[in-house]
Each structure stands twice: as C-alpha cells, then as structure tokens.
Amino acid sequence: MVPYMKRIYFLFLSLLLFSCNIPATDSPQSITAETPTFSVPTSTPAFLTFSPTPSLIPPTPTETPIPCDPLNADYCIMAGHFLFQHPIFPPGNDEVDLTYLYATTANGKRDPHHGVEFQNAFGTPVHAAGDGTVVFADSDTATLFSPWADFYGNVVIIRHTNQMYTLYAHLSAILVQPGIEVKAGDVIGQVGATGGATGAHLHFEVREGSDYTDYFSTQNPELWLIPQEGTGAMSITLKTSSEEKRERPLVITRYAAGSDAVLFTYYITSYAKGFEQNAEDAALNSLPAGRYKIAFNDTSGLRERIVEVEAGELTEVVFEVK
C-alpha cells in the first residue's frame, strides 16, 4: 500500500505546483467590440470611369447646305464677283446705256460691243473703278487694243489683282500717267468723244488675262460692277446643241411687289457671235430687287420663267434651248 500511496501523493503535489505557476492579472480584462467603419470614395473608382478618346467621339451631325444648281432650278441666287465700282459718280449719269449692251450689235447696226457705255457730257469726271496700277495712259494710235488704230482714242488702262484690267476710252483728257498707283474713286480722266466715238460718252471695259491688249479678253462689266444700293444683277445662259453664240431677242419684265403690275420692260438681245469665251449669254446690272419674268422664243414656242432679284446678289438663270 505504501508505494500506491506515494504515487497518489506525488500526483497531487505536481498538480498543486502547476496551478501555482499561472500568472495573476491585476484586474479582469474587458473586451470592447469595435464598430466597423466604411470609407465612401469621393471619386469614381478608376475601373468605373470611361473617358473616350476624342478621335472616337462621334461628331455632332450637321447639315451641309447643297449648292443651288441653275441647271436644275428655275434660278439661283449667288454672291457674284462684284469687284468694281461705277466709273461715273452722281450727279453724272452712272447707269449703263441699254441701247448698246455688251456683246450686242444694236440690232445689227453696229459692231459687236466689247464694253458698256455711260452717256455723259464732255468733261464729266471719270473715276478709277478699283485700286490698281495705271499701265497705259495715251491714245491708241500706236498701241492697239482693238483691230483698228485710233478706235478708242484717249485711253487709260488700270491693272488690278488677279490679272483683271479696266479700260476707259474716248476720254477728252487723261489725268494720270503710266506706273502710278490709284485708289478706287480717284479721278483719272474726263469724258470725251475721241477715237471712233460719235458723241460724248465713256466706253468702259473689263478685261481678264495676261494680255490686256487682247480685244477678245473682255468680260461683261455688268457682272463685275458693284450693284447700286437696293439693286442686284442677273445673268442668263442659253444652253444649245451649238456652241456658237447668236443674238436672240429677250424680254425681261419687272413687276410691282405683290402684284402683276408691270413697272418696266427691258428689251435686250443675247450675245452675238464672237463671244463664245463668255459662259453666259446676257447680263444686266442695277436691277431693282423684286420679281421678274424672262421671255423668249425657241423652236418649241414661247419660253417664260419667273425669277427673283435680291439686292447685292446675282440671279443666275439657265435655259435648255431647243
């Protein structure tokens, strides 16, 4: 029994010693539960942000205006290329003579006209139609600007930009010299009747190209002169199977606003043979804004068309002629 009792004794003693080695605490520990916190992002996370490359952004659809085509419309209103002012100032007569228009023959009585005329008294001041350089200021007895010597008499020619030239003929006095620069409106001469003129007037031409002496380089001045206030211009093209020009009577009627009351009638002709370099077949400037009727005859009978003229603009009209 003694050994058995010893084992019990030693077991008891070991348990007692083990319990005595457990460290003591000053006070019981308390466990505090922490409230979880959540951080709300102030900006959109990178993986949620979509910034398309500018080149990938589809363009805002815009409507592109379709240019007016006079071949498929009754008429088109264009900006025109009005570069030059009228060479005669009021109180002088600044209106083009309707009886002898550009590229017409006065009903076969005269040679085809390469310019327009401003009927005025002797000595009326003639003004430069635009800024430029005087390239000629003399009579045309030695230097020819037509097939005939002394045809224009005393002449002034001014070179403008883009190989454009203005010619002033039949002057009674020349007041400029070659090589000088002039501004639009400067007085360059006086109206006269030199050369082949039959009365006092200014013969005015617009020429285009590198050779200003070329008699056939002329353009219709009515398509280059700035329309007077409240007026516009009109060009008429007669498309035919033949490229050859021929004079054809045209009647252009101007109506009162809002009615068919006739205010004025223009009796003109289309261009004569020899002006095939010109795209159009007739032109008028300084037409009061409003409604007009163009009438002429071809093999199909009477042709008529109503058109509008706007101030400061060009009305372009094209007919398919049979």
Image: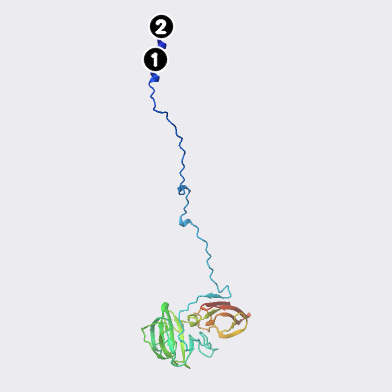
The vertical placement of 30 against 87, above or below, is above
Q: Quadrant of the N terminus?
A: top left
Tell me the quarter of the picture where residue 165 sits: bottom left
In this rendered view, identify the residue nearer to me: 260 or 206.
Answer: 260
The vertical placement of 295 against 29, above or below, is below
Q: Earlier in the sequence, mark 2 or mark 1?
A: 2
Q: Are marks 2 and 1 in contact (CB under 8 Å)?
A: no
Residue lying at 42% horizontally and 78% vertically, measured from the top left: 163
Q: Residue furthest front?
A: 27
Instruction: Identify residue for label 1.
Output: 13
Mark 1: which secondary structure? helix
Q: Residue furthest top?
A: 1
Tell me, yes or no, if residue 190 can be seen here: yes
Instruction: Kindly identify the amino acid type of the residue bearing the numbered disc 1.
Output: Leu
Residue lying at 46% horizontally and 57% vertically, measured from the top left: 55
C-alpha distance separating marks 2 and 1: 16 Å
Query: Residue 32's mark?
Result: none
Query: Residue 2's mark?
Result: 2
Counting from the top left corner in percent of width and height, residue 148 is at 44, 89
